Image: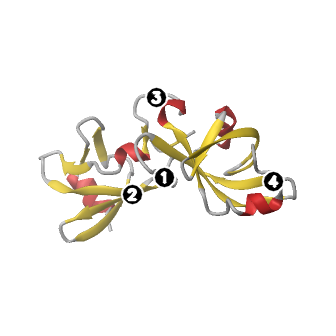
Amino acid sequence: MFLNGTYIGVNYMSNEKITVATVLKPQGIRGEIKVKVLCDDAEVLKSFKSVLIDGEEIPVLAVRAQGDTAYIMLKGVADRNAAELLRGKNLLVARENMPKLPEGRYYIADLTGCRVVTSAGEVLGEVTDVTPARTDIYTIKTASGETSFAAAEGVIEEVDVPARIITVNKKRFKEVSV
């Protein structure tokens, strides 16, 4: 469920809810939907009894996980027409229903808004997005615009979520930022 130290759950609505998937399209004629999974492991979707779509809690009837996609049956979505209405919608789960994270792992929702500072205390910017990849790509808003950097080895020295601060090695940061 984790990738390079970051638990995937992007496009969150608030820190109380985490986006776990986005509806791609209907699958078949019985209301099943195909979703792009925003967790590192689609199997985690099987643990959720319900999801939130547009603020409405909908019970999950069945999940078939397959790579970075899954096929989901939701209560009240009985046919292809009902499934089509969900295209492009995000599936969210209450934070308390998310799996516990091991030490050194973070929800993207918790990293967004953190200040990025050097070990000397120089403020570089604020995290606006984290793009999951083999090496996660952090995007920060700086005084002069926007900068992205790879979370390559040696770049991030410390993450203090309660203090909302990510400390980076300035030399390594400059080597990997664009």
Residue 7 visible in the current orientation: no
Q: Secondary structure at mark 2?
A: strand
Foreground: disc 2 or disc 4 = 4
Task: Out of 105 and 163, give the one closest to the viewer.
Answer: 163
Q: Residue at x 50, y 28 (%)?
A: 100
Which part of the image, by quadrant, shows the C terminus? bottom left
Check whether the beta carbons of the residues at disc 1 and disc 2 lie within 8 A of each other.
yes
Vertical position of residue 124 compared to residue 105: above or below: below
- The residue beneath circle 4 is 31
Foreground: disc 1 or disc 4 = 4
Foreground: disc 2 or disc 3 = 2
Colour scheme: secondary structure
Q: Residue at x 70, y 62 (%)?
A: 85
Q: Quadrant of residue 165?
A: top left
Distance between the alpha carbons at the discs numbered 2 and 3: 22 Å
- The residue beneath circle 2 is 129
Which badge, 2 or 3, is on the more N-terminal residue? 3
Which badge, 3 or 1, is on the more N-terminal residue? 1
- The residue beneath circle 1 is 10
Distance between the alpha carbons at the discs numbered 1 and 2: 8 Å
Vertical position of residue 50 compared to residue 117: above or below: above
Distance between the alpha carbons at the discs numbered 3 and 1: 19 Å
Q: Amino acid at mark 2?
A: Asp
Assess disc 1: are there few (<14), some (14-19) or many (≥20) residues with their C-alpha within 10 Å of its C-alpha: many
